[in-house]
Amino acid sequence: MRADRLLSIMLLLQTYGRITTAELADRLEVSERTIHRDMEALGSAGVPVMAMRGTGGGWQLMNEYKTNLTGLHEEEIASLFVGAPERVLHDLGLRRASEGALIKLLAALPSVGRRTAEFVRERIHIDAAGWHDSGESVEPLPLLQEAVLRERQVKLSYDKGKAGVSERVVDPLGLVIKGTVWYLVAGVQGEPRTYRIARIVQCEMLDEASARPPGFQLASYWEASTEQFVTTLPRFEAAFRIDAAYTHLTMYWKYSKVLEQGTAGEDGRVPCRMRFQSEEEACRFALSLGPHGELAEPAELRTKVAEMARGAAALYGEP
């Protein structure tokens, strides 16, 4: 709605002091021409907006004009009170602060908004832990958080698994939590890298200021690196014939994806093609089906499954 957009423009100008037409258009997802029309509308309504020409120009409010009107509608209020998962706030040491901020916001809302906030808060809860919590240590997190916010370099010892522990000095750029696992994104010689915090053996904040690559955006970097990671994962496809009553098992096998699933044939079995990260995972899934399904292809993998089955039978068979 245009009224919401006009209010958003006023609040952005009030917050940032000066902002360009291009930045406003990008934030509000409209054309620059629409922004110019909105500015004319604000001026006609008595809002003292002023256009600054030349390099570093943009729009700003005159005479430190401010509005106390937040104009939050129901959906915006609901989004605020759904809130961040408690696990995340706890790890960052912000749980009490978050609760205090929500109480103050609740008190400041008009009665209608307060009813919306309380209604949503009592009906939606986000549990980010899932059923398989990683249980990883986040002991270095407070120091890393301080280094990120103070823009200070960090010297850390990082466990690279079989390659051993290495030491390096990094420029902290941000913290990311995926599921329940925390990561540090840091620059090394100007290049962003990702470090799993549970693998940081030791860390120390230095006095030297950290460097941030020009134009670096944490969310954009994480999205791009995640896509790259997924595309480099090993992939192995296999076809199965599964009893119709047991096809639901395909949904629960970790690190796999169902590519195709047909309908049950005369024998009551459903053809299903899946993707795994390795041959071993495909074999384990085939064995987990027991007599309720079989690996149809690739043919050479059937031999491997048979060998594993014979080994299991020998182990658990009667003496």
Image: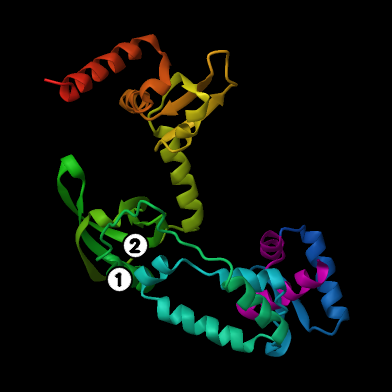
Q: Is residue 206 rendered magenta in the image? A: no
How far across and down, in percent of the image, does residue 285 sit? Answer: 37, 27
| Residue that appears at 37% across and 23% down | 286
Compared across the picture, whether 138 is left or right of 43 comes to: left
Residue named by callout 2: 172
| Residue that appears at 72% across and 74% down | 73
> Can you say which quadrant of the picture contains the N terminus?
bottom right
Q: Is residue 97 visible?
A: yes
How far across and down, in percent of the image, does residue 17 sit? Answer: 63, 79
Q: CA distance from mark 2 to mark 1?
A: 13 Å
Tell me the element at label 1.
helix
Disc 2 residue crowd, few under 14, some 14–19, many 20+, Cα 10 Å: many
Task: Give the answer, above or below, for where 127 lies relative to 290.
Answer: below
Rendered image coloring scheme = rainbow
Numbered label attached to residue 142: 1
**What amino acid is at disc 2?**
Pro
Front residue (pair 113, 38): 113
| Residue that appears at 27% across and 57% down | 136
**What amino acid is at disc 1?**
Pro
Examine the image and state in which quarter residue 51 appears: bottom right
Tell me the element at label 2.
strand
Q: Is residue 52 visible?
A: no
Front residue (pair 97, 61): 97
How far across and down, in percent of the image, does residue 296 sit? Answer: 43, 14
How far across and down, in percent of the image, does residue 37 sit? Answer: 85, 67
Q: Which residues are magenta?
A: 1-28
> Can you say which quadrant of the picture contains the C terminus?
top left
Numbered label attached to residue 166: none
